[in-house]
Amino acid sequence: MTDDVIEMAGAVAPEGAPDASPVLRAVGLAKSFVVRGARGRRAVVRAVDDVSLDLHRGRVLALVGESGSGKSTVARLLAQLYPSTRGEVVLRGEAVRVRGGRRFRRYCRSVQMIFQDPFASLNPIHTIGYTLRRAIRIHHPKANRAQREAMLTGLLEQVHLTPASRYVDKFPHELSGGQRQRVAIARALGARPEVLLADEPVSMLDVSIRLGVLNLLQELKDELSLAILYITHDIASARYFADETIVMYAGRIVEHGDSERVTQAPAHPYTRLLVASAPDPDALDVERPPTSAGEPPSLISPPSGCRFHPRCPQAMARCSVEAPPLLPVPGGTAACWLYEASTGEDGTTEEAS
Ligand SMILES: Nc1ncnc2c1ncn2[C@@H]1O[C@H](COP(=O)(O)OP(=O)(O)OP(=O)(O)O)[C@@H](O)[C@H]1O
Protein backbone atom coordinates (compact mmCIF):
# COMPACT_ATOMS: atom_id res chain seq x y z
CA MET A 1 0.00 0.00 0.00
CA THR A 2 1.23 3.49 -0.73
CA ASP A 3 1.43 6.01 2.09
CA ASP A 4 -1.50 7.80 0.51
CA VAL A 5 -3.66 4.73 0.67
CA ILE A 6 -2.67 3.76 4.19
CA GLU A 7 -3.74 7.18 5.37
CA MET A 8 -7.03 7.04 3.53
CA ALA A 9 -7.92 3.48 4.52
CA GLY A 10 -8.30 4.04 8.24
CA ALA A 11 -8.84 7.15 10.28
CA VAL A 12 -6.87 9.82 8.44
CA ALA A 13 -4.07 11.18 10.57
CA PRO A 14 -3.34 14.89 10.87
CA GLU A 15 -0.37 16.05 8.90
CA GLY A 16 0.92 18.19 11.68
CA ALA A 17 0.02 20.63 14.36
CA PRO A 18 -1.63 23.92 13.38
CA ASP A 19 0.93 25.84 11.43
CA ALA A 20 1.92 29.47 12.00
CA SER A 21 2.10 30.21 8.28
CA PRO A 22 -1.20 30.35 6.42
CA VAL A 23 -1.95 27.48 4.05
CA LEU A 24 -4.19 29.60 1.82
CA ARG A 25 -4.28 33.38 1.46
CA ALA A 26 -6.31 35.93 -0.40
CA VAL A 27 -4.20 39.01 -1.11
CA GLY A 28 -6.09 42.10 -2.24
CA LEU A 29 -8.66 40.05 -4.14
CA ALA A 30 -11.18 41.88 -6.30
CA LYS A 31 -13.86 40.57 -8.62
CA SER A 32 -16.07 42.50 -11.01
CA PHE A 33 -18.82 40.98 -13.13
CA VAL A 34 -19.99 42.57 -16.34
CA VAL A 35 -23.78 42.48 -16.56
CA ARG A 36 -26.53 44.00 -18.69
CA GLY A 37 -27.96 46.94 -16.76
CA ALA A 38 -30.91 49.20 -17.43
CA ARG A 39 -31.95 49.37 -21.13
CA GLY A 40 -29.45 46.64 -21.98
CA ARG A 41 -26.47 48.82 -21.11
CA ARG A 42 -23.26 47.19 -19.99
CA ALA A 43 -22.71 47.59 -16.25
CA VAL A 44 -20.02 46.40 -13.87
CA VAL A 45 -20.88 44.78 -10.54
CA ARG A 46 -18.01 45.27 -8.10
CA ALA A 47 -18.77 42.14 -6.08
CA VAL A 48 -15.50 41.90 -4.14
CA ASP A 49 -13.07 44.72 -3.52
CA ASP A 50 -9.63 44.38 -1.93
CA VAL A 51 -10.24 41.35 0.26
CA SER A 52 -7.26 39.84 2.08
CA LEU A 53 -7.50 36.91 4.47
CA ASP A 54 -5.41 34.03 5.77
CA LEU A 55 -6.51 30.46 6.41
CA HIS A 56 -4.49 28.39 8.86
CA ARG A 57 -4.51 24.65 9.37
CA GLY A 58 -6.52 23.60 12.41
CA ARG A 59 -8.48 26.87 12.47
CA VAL A 60 -11.87 28.12 11.32
CA LEU A 61 -12.31 31.57 9.83
CA ALA A 62 -15.91 32.77 9.48
CA LEU A 63 -16.96 35.13 6.69
CA VAL A 64 -20.15 36.86 7.76
CA GLY A 65 -22.42 39.37 6.02
CA GLU A 66 -25.79 40.01 4.47
CA SER A 67 -26.89 38.46 1.22
CA GLY A 68 -24.98 40.00 -1.68
CA SER A 69 -22.00 41.14 0.41
CA GLY A 70 -19.62 39.02 -1.68
CA LYS A 71 -19.00 36.02 0.59
CA SER A 72 -19.65 33.31 -2.00
CA THR A 73 -17.63 35.19 -4.59
CA VAL A 74 -14.63 35.19 -2.21
CA ALA A 75 -15.03 31.42 -1.74
CA ARG A 76 -15.25 30.87 -5.48
CA LEU A 77 -12.16 32.97 -6.08
CA LEU A 78 -10.29 30.93 -3.46
CA ALA A 79 -11.55 27.71 -5.09
CA GLN A 80 -10.29 29.00 -8.48
CA LEU A 81 -13.80 28.71 -9.89
CA TYR A 82 -13.55 32.36 -10.97
CA PRO A 83 -10.46 34.24 -12.12
CA SER A 84 -9.87 37.31 -10.00
CA THR A 85 -10.04 40.80 -11.47
CA ARG A 86 -7.19 41.88 -9.19
CA GLY A 87 -5.18 40.32 -6.40
CA GLU A 88 -3.81 36.87 -5.76
CA VAL A 89 -4.68 33.52 -4.28
CA VAL A 90 -1.62 32.10 -2.54
CA LEU A 91 -1.39 28.40 -1.66
CA ARG A 92 1.47 27.41 0.65
CA GLY A 93 3.37 30.57 -0.24
CA GLU A 94 2.88 30.33 -4.02
CA ALA A 95 0.56 32.50 -6.07
CA VAL A 96 -1.79 30.20 -7.99
CA ARG A 97 -3.98 30.98 -10.97
CA VAL A 98 -5.48 27.96 -12.70
CA ARG A 99 -8.27 27.57 -15.20
CA GLY A 100 -9.41 23.95 -15.54
CA GLY A 101 -7.30 21.01 -16.61
CA ARG A 102 -4.72 19.04 -14.70
CA ARG A 103 -3.46 22.00 -12.66
CA PHE A 104 -6.99 22.71 -11.47
CA ARG A 105 -7.44 19.07 -10.42
CA ARG A 106 -4.17 19.25 -8.51
CA TYR A 107 -5.29 22.46 -6.81
CA CYS A 108 -8.59 20.77 -5.86
CA ARG A 109 -6.68 18.11 -4.01
CA SER A 110 -5.64 20.80 -1.54
CA VAL A 111 -8.68 23.07 -1.59
CA GLN A 112 -12.19 21.63 -1.58
CA MET A 113 -15.52 23.40 -1.47
CA ILE A 114 -18.76 22.37 0.25
CA PHE A 115 -21.90 24.00 -1.06
CA GLN A 116 -25.03 25.17 0.68
CA ASP A 117 -27.46 22.81 -0.99
CA PRO A 118 -26.67 19.11 -0.60
CA PHE A 119 -29.69 18.31 -2.83
CA ALA A 120 -28.10 20.14 -5.73
CA SER A 121 -24.51 19.09 -5.12
CA LEU A 122 -25.15 15.32 -5.22
CA ASN A 123 -26.26 13.76 -8.49
CA PRO A 124 -29.69 12.20 -7.81
CA ILE A 125 -29.22 9.36 -10.29
CA HIS A 126 -26.10 7.99 -8.61
CA THR A 127 -25.76 6.06 -5.38
CA ILE A 128 -23.64 7.36 -2.53
CA GLY A 129 -21.15 4.57 -3.27
CA TYR A 130 -20.86 5.67 -6.91
CA THR A 131 -20.33 9.32 -5.97
CA LEU A 132 -17.63 8.57 -3.40
CA ARG A 133 -15.88 5.91 -5.50
CA ARG A 134 -15.67 8.42 -8.34
CA ALA A 135 -14.02 11.02 -6.08
CA ILE A 136 -11.62 8.38 -4.76
CA ARG A 137 -10.72 7.27 -8.31
CA ILE A 138 -10.02 10.85 -9.37
CA HIS A 139 -7.83 11.69 -6.40
CA HIS A 140 -6.15 8.29 -5.88
CA PRO A 141 -5.74 6.88 -9.37
CA LYS A 142 -3.06 4.41 -8.30
CA ALA A 143 -5.11 2.71 -5.59
CA ASN A 144 -6.35 -0.79 -6.40
CA ARG A 145 -9.95 -1.91 -5.95
CA ALA A 146 -9.54 -3.25 -2.41
CA GLN A 147 -7.77 -0.08 -1.35
CA ARG A 148 -10.51 2.06 -2.89
CA GLU A 149 -13.20 0.10 -1.05
CA ALA A 150 -11.31 0.56 2.22
CA MET A 151 -11.16 4.30 1.53
CA LEU A 152 -14.90 4.38 0.83
CA THR A 153 -15.66 2.76 4.19
CA GLY A 154 -13.16 5.05 5.92
CA LEU A 155 -14.77 8.18 4.45
CA LEU A 156 -18.31 7.20 5.47
CA GLU A 157 -17.10 6.35 8.96
CA GLN A 158 -15.28 9.65 9.19
CA VAL A 159 -18.57 11.53 8.68
CA HIS A 160 -20.36 9.15 11.07
CA LEU A 161 -22.50 7.43 8.45
CA THR A 162 -22.16 4.01 10.02
CA PRO A 163 -22.30 1.18 9.38
CA ALA A 164 -20.99 2.27 5.98
CA SER A 165 -22.67 -0.71 4.25
CA ARG A 166 -26.07 0.81 5.09
CA TYR A 167 -25.34 3.92 3.00
CA VAL A 168 -23.28 2.73 0.05
CA ASP A 169 -26.22 1.65 -2.12
CA LYS A 170 -28.57 4.45 -1.13
CA PHE A 171 -29.57 7.26 -3.46
CA PRO A 172 -29.47 10.90 -2.27
CA HIS A 173 -33.29 11.09 -2.03
CA GLU A 174 -33.23 8.23 0.50
CA LEU A 175 -31.13 10.30 2.92
CA SER A 176 -31.99 13.27 5.13
CA GLY A 177 -30.55 16.70 4.34
CA GLY A 178 -27.99 16.31 7.12
CA GLN A 179 -26.91 12.88 5.84
CA ARG A 180 -26.58 14.27 2.33
CA GLN A 181 -24.40 17.10 3.60
CA ARG A 182 -22.26 14.50 5.40
CA VAL A 183 -21.85 12.67 2.08
CA ALA A 184 -20.81 15.95 0.42
CA ILE A 185 -18.26 16.44 3.21
CA ALA A 186 -17.01 12.84 2.77
CA ARG A 187 -16.61 13.45 -0.96
CA ALA A 188 -14.56 16.57 -0.23
CA LEU A 189 -12.41 14.64 2.25
CA GLY A 190 -11.74 12.04 -0.45
CA ALA A 191 -9.21 14.47 -1.90
CA ARG A 192 -7.39 14.66 1.44
CA PRO A 193 -7.60 18.46 1.33
CA GLU A 194 -5.82 20.94 3.55
CA VAL A 195 -8.56 23.55 3.14
CA LEU A 196 -12.36 23.28 3.19
CA LEU A 197 -14.34 26.22 1.84
CA ALA A 198 -17.79 25.72 3.39
CA ASP A 199 -20.35 28.03 1.80
CA GLU A 200 -23.32 28.18 4.18
CA PRO A 201 -22.98 24.45 4.89
CA VAL A 202 -25.91 24.27 7.33
CA SER A 203 -28.29 27.03 6.30
CA MET A 204 -30.51 24.71 4.21
CA LEU A 205 -30.63 22.00 6.84
CA ASP A 206 -33.28 21.39 9.45
CA VAL A 207 -32.72 23.42 12.57
CA SER A 208 -32.36 20.24 14.65
CA ILE A 209 -29.41 18.87 12.69
CA ARG A 210 -27.38 22.03 12.05
CA LEU A 211 -25.38 21.73 15.22
CA GLY A 212 -24.51 18.08 14.46
CA VAL A 213 -23.01 19.02 11.08
CA LEU A 214 -21.07 21.97 12.55
CA ASN A 215 -19.78 19.68 15.32
CA LEU A 216 -18.68 17.18 12.67
CA LEU A 217 -16.77 19.89 10.80
CA GLN A 218 -15.12 20.98 14.02
CA GLU A 219 -14.12 17.41 14.82
CA LEU A 220 -12.67 16.93 11.31
CA LYS A 221 -10.81 20.23 11.59
CA ASP A 222 -9.08 18.96 14.74
CA GLU A 223 -8.48 15.39 13.50
CA LEU A 224 -7.19 16.36 10.08
CA SER A 225 -5.78 19.76 10.92
CA LEU A 226 -8.00 21.31 8.25
CA ALA A 227 -8.19 25.02 7.53
CA ILE A 228 -11.89 25.90 7.22
CA LEU A 229 -13.51 28.98 5.71
CA TYR A 230 -17.04 29.07 7.13
CA ILE A 231 -19.42 31.32 5.23
CA THR A 232 -22.60 32.30 7.01
CA HIS A 233 -25.31 34.94 7.42
CA ASP A 234 -25.53 33.94 11.05
CA ILE A 235 -23.06 35.83 13.20
CA ALA A 236 -24.20 33.85 16.27
CA SER A 237 -22.96 30.61 14.71
CA ALA A 238 -19.63 32.28 13.89
CA ARG A 239 -19.08 32.84 17.60
CA TYR A 240 -19.76 29.20 18.32
CA PHE A 241 -17.84 27.67 15.44
CA ALA A 242 -15.05 29.97 14.27
CA ASP A 243 -11.77 31.06 15.84
CA GLU A 244 -11.72 34.30 13.85
CA THR A 245 -14.45 36.24 12.10
CA ILE A 246 -14.40 38.59 9.14
CA VAL A 247 -17.44 40.75 8.48
CA MET A 248 -18.10 41.85 4.90
CA TYR A 249 -20.29 44.68 3.70
CA ALA A 250 -20.94 45.44 0.03
CA GLY A 251 -17.86 43.56 -1.19
CA ARG A 252 -15.41 44.88 1.40
CA ILE A 253 -14.10 43.70 4.74
CA VAL A 254 -15.37 45.99 7.49
CA GLU A 255 -14.16 44.12 10.56
CA HIS A 256 -11.81 41.27 11.45
CA GLY A 257 -10.79 39.73 14.73
CA ASP A 258 -11.16 36.99 17.25
CA SER A 259 -14.75 35.64 16.98
CA GLU A 260 -15.55 36.14 20.63
CA ARG A 261 -14.49 39.79 20.44
CA VAL A 262 -16.19 40.51 17.10
CA THR A 263 -19.50 39.01 18.27
CA GLN A 264 -19.44 40.21 21.88
CA ALA A 265 -17.80 43.62 21.51
CA PRO A 266 -18.24 44.55 17.84
CA ALA A 267 -16.34 47.66 16.81
CA HIS A 268 -17.76 48.52 13.37
CA PRO A 269 -21.23 50.12 13.34
CA TYR A 270 -22.32 47.54 10.72
CA THR A 271 -21.17 44.61 12.88
CA ARG A 272 -23.06 46.17 15.79
CA LEU A 273 -26.22 46.22 13.67
CA LEU A 274 -25.68 42.59 12.63
CA VAL A 275 -25.18 41.49 16.24
CA ALA A 276 -28.16 43.53 17.46
CA SER A 277 -30.43 41.91 14.90
CA ALA A 278 -29.43 38.37 15.93
CA PRO A 279 -31.94 37.85 18.76
CA ASP A 280 -30.31 34.99 20.66
CA PRO A 281 -26.56 34.73 20.32
CA ASP A 282 -26.53 31.25 21.87
CA ALA A 283 -29.06 29.73 19.49
CA LEU A 284 -28.21 28.23 16.13
CA ASP A 285 -31.78 27.43 15.45
CA VAL A 286 -33.37 30.07 13.28
CA GLU A 287 -32.68 31.74 9.96
CA ARG A 288 -32.11 35.35 10.92
CA PRO A 289 -31.56 37.72 8.03
CA PRO A 290 -30.38 40.98 9.55
CA THR A 291 -33.17 43.47 10.08
CA SER A 292 -31.08 46.61 10.29
CA ALA A 293 -32.54 49.75 8.79
CA GLY A 294 -32.01 50.25 5.07
CA GLU A 295 -30.82 48.00 2.32
CA PRO A 296 -27.37 46.99 1.11
CA PRO A 297 -26.26 49.33 -1.69
CA SER A 298 -26.07 48.66 -5.38
CA LEU A 299 -22.70 47.21 -6.29
CA ILE A 300 -22.96 48.74 -9.75
CA SER A 301 -22.74 52.27 -8.33
CA PRO A 302 -21.77 51.80 -4.69
CA PRO A 303 -21.79 54.79 -2.32
CA SER A 304 -18.62 56.87 -2.30
CA GLY A 305 -16.30 56.69 0.69
CA CYS A 306 -17.36 54.11 3.25
CA ARG A 307 -20.01 51.98 1.54
CA PHE A 308 -21.92 51.71 4.81
CA HIS A 309 -22.20 55.45 5.40
CA PRO A 310 -25.80 55.90 4.11
CA ARG A 311 -26.99 53.38 6.74
CA CYS A 312 -24.57 54.27 9.49
CA PRO A 313 -25.93 55.87 12.68
CA GLN A 314 -22.46 57.31 13.39
CA ALA A 315 -21.58 58.60 9.94
CA MET A 316 -19.46 61.77 9.76
CA ALA A 317 -18.89 64.11 6.82
CA ARG A 318 -15.62 62.40 5.97
CA CYS A 319 -17.27 58.97 5.66
CA SER A 320 -19.01 59.85 2.38
CA VAL A 321 -15.74 61.06 0.87
CA GLU A 322 -12.93 58.76 1.99
CA ALA A 323 -13.05 54.99 2.33
CA PRO A 324 -11.48 54.05 5.67
CA PRO A 325 -8.73 51.44 5.67
CA LEU A 326 -8.77 48.63 8.24
CA LEU A 327 -7.67 50.39 11.42
CA PRO A 328 -6.51 48.70 14.61
CA VAL A 329 -9.11 48.09 17.33
CA PRO A 330 -8.56 45.98 20.44
CA GLY A 331 -8.38 42.37 19.23
CA GLY A 332 -8.55 43.06 15.50
CA THR A 333 -9.25 45.68 12.87
CA ALA A 334 -12.24 47.73 11.72
CA ALA A 335 -12.65 49.82 8.58
CA CYS A 336 -14.15 52.83 10.30
CA TRP A 337 -12.95 56.38 10.81
CA LEU A 338 -14.12 56.15 14.44
CA TYR A 339 -10.91 54.28 15.12
CA GLU A 340 -8.43 56.56 13.50
CA ALA A 341 -5.79 57.24 16.10
CA SER A 342 -5.18 60.95 16.56
CA THR A 343 -2.26 62.54 18.31
CA GLY A 344 -3.24 64.44 21.44
CA GLU A 345 -1.64 67.69 22.63
CA ASP A 346 0.52 65.74 25.09
CA GLY A 347 1.82 63.57 22.27
CA THR A 348 -0.21 60.48 23.27
CA THR A 349 -2.40 58.74 20.71
CA GLU A 350 -6.12 58.32 21.24
CA GLU A 351 -9.01 56.98 19.21
CA ALA A 352 -11.39 59.37 17.52
CA SER A 353 -14.41 57.72 19.20
N1 LIG B 1 -21.84 35.39 -11.85
C1 LIG B 1 -22.26 36.59 -11.48
N2 LIG B 1 -22.60 37.52 -12.39
C2 LIG B 1 -23.02 38.75 -12.03
N3 LIG B 1 -23.12 39.16 -10.75
C3 LIG B 1 -22.79 38.28 -9.80
C4 LIG B 1 -22.34 36.96 -10.10
N4 LIG B 1 -22.10 36.31 -8.93
C5 LIG B 1 -22.38 37.19 -7.95
N5 LIG B 1 -22.79 38.37 -8.47
C6 LIG B 1 -23.16 39.57 -7.71
O1 LIG B 1 -22.09 39.85 -6.83
C7 LIG B 1 -22.59 40.30 -5.57
C8 LIG B 1 -22.04 39.41 -4.47
O2 LIG B 1 -22.67 38.12 -4.59
P1 LIG B 1 -22.29 36.90 -3.65
O3 LIG B 1 -23.13 35.74 -4.08
O4 LIG B 1 -20.84 36.73 -3.61
O5 LIG B 1 -22.79 37.42 -2.21
P2 LIG B 1 -23.09 36.59 -0.90
O6 LIG B 1 -22.69 37.46 0.22
O7 LIG B 1 -22.48 35.26 -0.99
O8 LIG B 1 -24.66 36.47 -0.95
P3 LIG B 1 -25.57 35.22 -0.53
O9 LIG B 1 -25.42 35.12 0.94
O10 LIG B 1 -26.95 35.64 -0.96
O11 LIG B 1 -25.05 34.03 -1.27
C9 LIG B 1 -24.09 40.30 -5.68
O12 LIG B 1 -24.50 41.61 -6.03
C10 LIG B 1 -24.37 39.36 -6.82
O13 LIG B 1 -25.57 39.68 -7.47
Image (tube, helix red, strand yellow):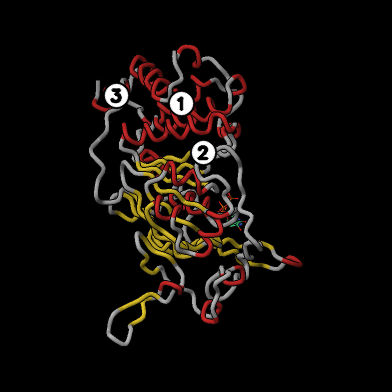
Relative to 30, say whether 182 is above or below.
Answer: above
- Closest to the camera, between mark 1 and mark 2, is 2
Q: Within 10 angstroms of label 3, few (less than 14), some, or many (20 or more) residues?
A: some
The single residue placed furthest to the right in the displayed view is 39
Q: 39 left or right of 189? A: right
What's the amino acid at mark 1? Arg
Q: Residue at x 43, y 32 (%)?
A: 215
The answer to whether marks 1 and 3 mark residues whose Cβ atoms lie closer than 8 Å is no
CA–CA distance between discs 1 and 2?
Answer: 22 Å
Residue in front for this viewpoint, 157 or 211? 211
Question: Where the N terminus falls, by quadrant?
Answer: top left
Spatial CA distance of label 1 from label 3 is: 15 Å
Mark with earlier residue (1, 2): 1
Q: Mark 1 points at which residue?
A: 134
> Image quadrant of residue 173?
top right
Residue type at the position of mark 2: Pro
At which x and y percent is residue 204? 59, 37
Which residue is drawn at the image coordinates 35% and 43% (left, top)? 227
Where is mark 3, residue-wise? 5
The residue under label 2 is 201
Ligand 1 is located in which of the four quadrants? Answer: bottom right
